[in-house]
Amino acid sequence: MQNSLAKKLAAAAAMTLVAGLAQAGDLHVSAAASLTNAFQDIAQAYEARHAGVKVLLNFGASGALLQQMAKGAPVDVFASADMETMDMAEKQKLVAAGERRNFARNSLVVIVPRDSKLAVARLQNLGQPALQKLAIGNPASVPAGRYTRHALEAAKLWPGIEAKAITTQNVRQALDYVARGEVDAGFVYGTDAALMKDKVKLAFEVPLDVAIGYPIARTAGAANPAEAKSFIGFVLSPAGQAVLARYGFKKP
Amino acid sequence: MNAWSALALSLKVAGCATLIDIVLGVAVGFLLARKRFPGRELLDTLLTLPMVMPPTVLGYYLLVLVGRHGWLGAWLQDSFGINLIFTWQGAVIAAAVVIFPLVFKPARAAFEAVDGQLEQAARVLGISEAALFFRVTLPLAWRGILAGVLLGFARALGEFGATLMVAGSIPGRTQTLSIAVYEAVQAGQDDTANLMVLLTSFVCVAVLLTAGRLAPGRLAGR
C-alpha cells in the first residue's frame, strides 16, 4: 500500500514537472530592467487581447540578458536599453536579421536620497568630498552604467569618480541603493527616478551626446516567431506606446 | 590580476568570518551542549536558520539591520561613524552569519560526545572548571569542532547572495571570487570566468579534503 502511494506521489510530481515546461502559448520576453513596470503592463494588456497566450517576462541588465541568450536561453523577444547590446546580439546572430525596431527613448539622470543635503546640480559636483558613494550600473553589462561612464569620460571626470562607484547588477539596483540612502547619489534613467518620487530626488539630467534608445527584436531561435512578431507590433502600436508614455518613456 | 585579488579578498573575508565564528560557535556550542535553560532548543533552531533560509532573505535582514537607516546601522553611524554597507567588513558579517550553523552545530555535537567520565576523573583530581574546559573538554572535542570550522570556511569562500546585497560588488574592495565569477559571466568574459571557477574549485576541494581528514570518524582509537 505504501508502495502504491509512493507511485502516485511520483506520478503527481512528474506531471507537475511536465506541466511546468514550456507550452505552445508561452512567449518568452527578455527585457532591460528599466522596462520592468511598463512591460508588465504591456504584457497584461497583450494577454487580454490574445487569449491563450502567456507572456513570460525576464528582466535584467541588457548585457546579462544577452549572455543568457548566447548560452542558449529560450527567448522569443529581446528588448535592450541600448543600441550597443542589440548590435552585439545582431553580430552573434542571436536576433532575426534586419527586424529590429526602436520603440522608446529615455534620459539619464542623477538622483540623491530624498533627505540629502548635498548640493548636486552638475556632473562636476559629484567630485565633492562629502559625496562618498555613487551607485552606477556595472559598465561591462549594464547600459545605464555605460552611458554614465561615457558622460563622465566626456567631462574628464571618470578617473576621479570611479573610486567612489558602487557598481550595481542593473539600473534598478542603483535606484534601490539611493532610495535606501546607502549611497549619496546614483545614475539611473529618468523613468526609474519617477517611480520612487517619495524616496529619491532628481538632481539633474545628465547631458549626453548619444540618444538612449530602446531597440526590440525577434530572436533568431524564437520558438514562437508569429507570436513574437505580434508582440513587437503591439509594443509599437498606439496602445503599447501609451503604456510606455505613462511611465515617462519618450517616443523613439 | 583581477582573479588573484578577488581570491585574496575571498580568503580574507572567509578567514575573518571563520575566526569570529570559532569564538562564538565554540561558546554557543558548549552552552547548548552542557547547560539546561528554558528556550535552549528554540535558540538552537534560531541559530540554525541561516543554513536553510535563502541568502537573499538573510541579505535583506542584514541590509535592514545594519544599513544606514537600520536601527543598528544608524547607531553605529552616529556613535562611531562606522558604516558597514559596501565594505569588506560588511561581507565578513554576512559570511559569519551564513556559516554560523556550520560551526556551532558540530561544536555542540563534539562537546556532547565528550566522555563525561574523563571530566569526572579530572574533577576528582582537583582541577578547576576553567582548566577542565581548556585542558580536558576542548582537546577532546577539538577535532569535531575543527571539521565544522573548515566546512564553514569553505562555505564562506562561496558566499554570494547575502554578501552581494550587503557589501555590493566593488572590484578590489568587496568583489569576492564568487561575485567576480558572476560579474564575468554577466559581461560575457568567459576566459576570466573559466580561470576563476577553476581557482574556486581547486581551493574548495583542498579545504574539503582537509576537513575530511579531520572528521571525527577518521580519528584513530575512537
Image (cartoon, rainbow, N blue to C red):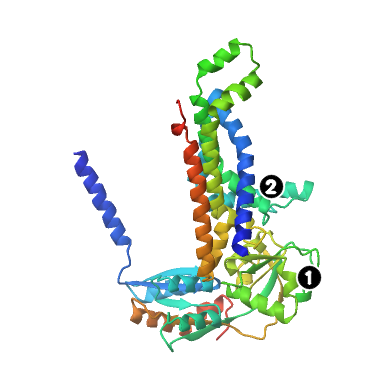
User: Depth check: A251 or A183 in front?
Assistant: A183
Residue drawn where x is 45% and y is 81% of the image: A92
| Eye-nearest disc, 2 or 1 | 1
Residue B97 image offset from top left, x and y in percent: 58, 44
Which chain is home to disc 2?
B
Amino acid found under the numbered disc labelled 2? Trp
Under circle 1, the secondary element is: helix
Instruction: Say which mark, if any, is on residue A127.
Output: 1
Residue B186 image offset from top left, x and y in percent: 52, 68
Q: Left of B155 or right of it: where is A5?
A: left
In the image, is residue B2 above or below residue B140? Answer: below
Near mark 1 (Cα within 10 A), the count class, few <14, some 14-19 or many ≥20, is some
Under circle 2, the secondary element is: helix
In the image, is residue A215 above or below residue A132? Answer: below
In the image, is residue A81 above or below residue B108? Answer: below
Circle 2 residue: B71
Amino acid found under the numbered disc labelled 1? Gly
Near mark 2 (Cα within 10 A), the count class, few <14, some 14-19 or many ≥20, is few
Whether residue B165 is visible, yes or no, is no
